[in-house]
Amino acid sequence: MSDTAASTDPIFYAVTEATWPAHRQLTCGPITLREGRGGGSRVSAATLDQPTATATELATAEAAMVQMGQDRLFMIRDGQDALDAQLAERGYVVKDPVQIWDCPVALLCDLDIPPVTAFAIEEPLAIQREIWAQGGIGPERLAVMERVTGPKITLLGRWDDSPAGTGFVAIHAGVAMVHALEILPHQRRRGMGAWLMRRAALWAQEQGADRLAVLCTKANPGANGLYASLGMTPAGGYHYRYNPDGV
């Protein structure tokens, strides 16, 4: 299978890398390996830096991932159909197709945020850590946030005088990317996600960023609906392939 033309601007992959970084990257021929230390697929997946790899190159990368104690996991970027087919032939299955959403920062800076609704906080408070923990975002992913070296901020939302949600934003190359947006179950469907996205945009504007982006699995209709309702537009994506036999 030959590669189709990629429609995703490569800047979004660079922004993802810088704003949600792996603990360590290693070069394995044409393949970049990532040591995630439990931080999730984005910081653990290998990527191919050219259209195709040989069977030997893939096998060497697989062995290195196993040696790190990680699953055999690859990120397939937009246009990498040849790699996708190669991995499918090796028994890999698709995991978590991801949609990238994007908009000009100014688009979400048009409304005044109600008082005491959404805050930008440099160091996450204990309640933010609790909200993240309830959403499955534990110490390993908090460590990813701590590794970011560029401009970054956390978000805290409140509704009815109670904590409602949290998130993380970081900037690279003029693009602010939102990660780990989590709303408490009993505070959902009240517009909190939208207010936190607008707070992220205001902070990004203050930092001189031009665009706001966020990643969302295609299997999450609620979150994708939120980003669409804000006027954000699809800007490409990627998916993973992993070996179901595990390590």
Image: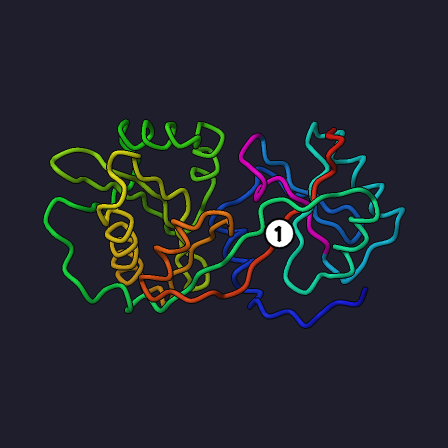
What residue is shown at x 35% (from left), y 64% (from top)? 209
- Counting every numbered tag in the picture gives 1
Left or right: 168 in relation to 90 = left
Q: Residue at x 67, y 54 (%)?
A: 76
Residue 192 is situated, as x and y percent measured from the top left of the image, at: 24, 47
Farthest residue in the bottom direction?
5
| Colour convention | rainbow
Is 6 situated left or right of 211 in this image? right
Q: Is residue 232 left or right of residue 39?
A: left
Q: Residue at x 47, y 34 (%)?
A: 141
Residue 176 found in image quarter? bottom left
35 to 237, vertically: above or below:
above
Is label 1 in a helix, a strand or a loop? Answer: strand
Q: Residue type at mark 1: give it.
A: His
Specify whether 168 is left or right of 45: left
10 or 150: nearer the viewer: 10
Indicate the quadrant containing the N terminus: top left, top right, bottom left or bottom right.
bottom right
Q: Quadrant of the C terminus?
A: top right
In the rendered image, the vertical position of residue 88 relative to residue 100, given as above or below: above
**Quadrant housing residue 25:** top right
Residue 238 picture location, percent across and down: 60, 56
> Measured along the vertical axis of the image, is residue 4 above or below residue 53?
below
Quadrant hosting residue 24: top right
Q: Badge 1 local density, few (<14 within 10 Å), some, or many (20+)?
A: some
Magenta-colored stretch includes residue 238: no
Range of magenta residues? 38-48
Measured as percent of width and height from the top left, residue 164 is found at 23, 37
Q: Position of residue 172 (x, y in %)?
A: 45, 58
Disc 1 designates what residue?
A: 239
